[in-house]
Amino acid sequence: MASDKPLVCVVYLGGTLVNDKDGSVSYTGGEAHLTDVDRDMTFHQFKMEVAEMHGGDVSGLTFKYPLPTNKKTLITISNDKDLRRMVDMNRDTASPEIYVLTKGAVPVNPPPETNNTPSRASMNSIVELPTPIPCNVERPNKLSVYWETAITGVGQLFKDVHDFRESLRKYAIAKNFGYKFVQNDRGRVTAKCKGEGCPWRIHASRVSTTKIIKVRVFKDVHTCDRIFGTQSHPPHVTRFWIADAVKKKLQDIPDYKVSDIVKDIYNEYGLKINYSQAWRGKETAREQLLGKDVDFYKQLPRYCEKLIETNPGSIAALATTNEERFHRLFVSFRACIHGFEHGCRPLLFLDGTSLKSKYGGTLLIAASLDGNDEIFPVAFAVVEQEEYVSWHWFLVQLKSALSSSRPLTFISDRHKGLQEAVPLVFEDSTHAFCLRYLTRDLKKEMKTYPKEVKDVVVELFFAAARACRKDEFVACIESIRSVSPEAATWIMDVEPERWANLFFKGSRYNQMASNVIEFIDGWITKACDFPVLKLVEAIRSEIVELFRARLEASDKWNTRLTAKAEEKMRREIDRAPLLSVSVSSALVFEVIDDHTNIVDLEKSDCTCLNWKVMGLPCRHLIASLNCIGRDAYDYCERYFLSDYYKLTYTESINPVLDVDSISSVSNAETVVDSYPNVELPKIHRQRGRPKKRRVELHDTEKRTFLCGKCKEPGHNKKTCKAFGLLTS
């Protein structure tokens, strides 16, 4: 059917609406494109078609079409229904016209026939024939081209003075000239071209007692060469304009790169800005989105009070310097404390990472393991730097948060401050070293060795740490010594009682390494540049989501143990029937596999040490229990039971403050009067560009490339001397 055929419409871009003498409206200037429009096309699809025509954003544009029988009236297209109605009304029109305009654009009157003669209809207005000088910058199909119609002539109306100033800025950018204000207040704005002796001038003032601004004088004549606005430094592209241009993307992509801002400004607007301009624009947009940093720091005392009020039993400790500047902040939510004491093993990982913000600082973390071997956050703090004083303060706050007196095992790197602070604050605790940090230091000691040799030594090092028999431990160390005597000496000097299962006095549940920082790295990557209060809120939101997700996942379990503990248990149960068991007494058994192992139920011990190390029955214990008809699940530590796992995540973390509202200056000023004053910390800038990514622990050696011919390192086949000899 004919009615189903698409309309071939003429889409006009980049021109101006003009009121003709008979009252009708026409579109002059710009360029024209043809496009097909039918009733099935959505308004979004139509906008995408227009966007492809000029290669820019269409968010600041509006779409209108004249009625087929009335050229004096323009109808706006703003949704799918409007677009379908346009198709239906223009079925009999040969080439329907659609005008693409900037929002707020109105038709202008044609210039008078007499040169420089004021119109009687506007006694206080002056209209001059425009004699535009061609712009010295080509911006085809860029959004800034359409700003040429931001200022159309005398009589144009703007909703307020800010709207007029912004339109004037866009107009100047599109025309590539600079201007300066002669008069600029709430009711009147007069501007002239920066060019020496250039007659370009515009004057606008308020309409009666309203906020509406009307253009009274517009002398659109340039005699200057406009060299003060170059392609590399376009006029009036300030940090505030850049902030408005990138604010939406920065909100959607918090780690929006400055280099990407430079590219996007050119691709969308055809404007070249340098890196420093883009950086200042991003910082301005960030401040507009997040609020001023000083307001967030002033809110910290109130935030701490509200945190304890909304989450009773939580700890929020704030410390300031003698100058009332921010110094440290410790936070531990009641839900985290409850989960650790009721469902997590008595195991705490301690670690820290630098915050890559302009104020510096370090984030300290204390975390444990739940019954499913997943990282469980217990407490965190923002301190000045990772040193003995800050770690001691952190551990004192942590001890005040914990109510149970069970002995704890701490796992961390070999930081000297931690080695001194842990036994001082937690007297009955044990302190183990993380093998990931130890292997990093070990590789540094072996810097002259090839990577393959280092990997072999590290593998033997881990085997020695997990060894449960002395002969196995000695064999691993001797194997290391045969490869590198220096490495073996270094390893034995690092106190084996701090890292080897065989000699460690506490219970580390076979947790040889910590990956706490890697676990929360995704939490803080997008927020590490935020003020402290926003960082705390970001972490709180992540913990809330973590608790919810894990509790929902545990509802699907139908086993007595957690998913990972059940998997370990099943492996041991399957191997137990293959072992030979001799009953020495009612509670003592001899179990033989590769070695003879003694199981003592009274002492809860097996000579293989796996029962003690894992917290779950080993295969020797299970084989012994099978002989006397006991259930091996009764000998699992409570932390691995599903019920205790769910208990870990039962308490909730309640919202504290609406942090987004703090960016309001008036709101911030009304609530801080009754609280202690907290000023911004001092900025300690480091040399070079600030790093936004944390340095990884794994070895970062460069890859060794081999020659494609002789397979030797240090050269390629083009420079291979051996290959040259063979071919000569």
Image (cartoon, rainbow, N blue to C red):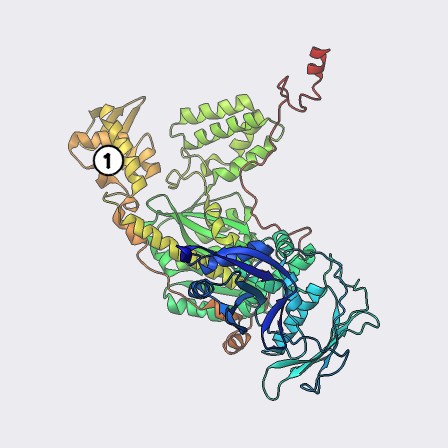
The quarter of the picture where residue 561 lies is top left
Looking at the image, residue 331 sits to the left or right of residue 29; the answer is left
Residue drawn 58% across and 74% down? Answer: 24
Q: Is residue 520 above or below residue 636?
A: below
Q: What is the quadrant of the C terminus in the image? A: top right
The residue closer to the viewer here, 499 or 9, is 9
The quadrant holding residue 441 is: top right
Q: Position of residue 270 (x, y in %)?
A: 66, 56
| Tag 1: amino acid | Leu
Q: Is residue 428 visible?
A: no
Q: Nearer the viewer, residue 414 or 553?
A: 553
Dot 1: few (<14), some (14–19), or many (≥20) neighbours within 10 Å?
Answer: some
Position of 534 compared to 547: left or right?
Answer: right
Of 579 and 419, the residue lying toward us? 579
Say which quarter of the image contains residue 681: bottom right
Give residue 133's position: percent from left, percent from top: 77, 65
Answer yes or no: is residue 464 visible.
yes
Across and down, in percent, residue 195 comes to 81, 69
Q: Which residue is mark 1?
A: 601
Q: Residue at x 64, y 20 (%)?
A: 712
Secondary structure at numbered mark 1: loop
Residue at left offset 63%, top offset 65%:
15
What x and y, as percent, mark residue 432? Answer: 45, 41
* As drawn, 535 above or below 480: below
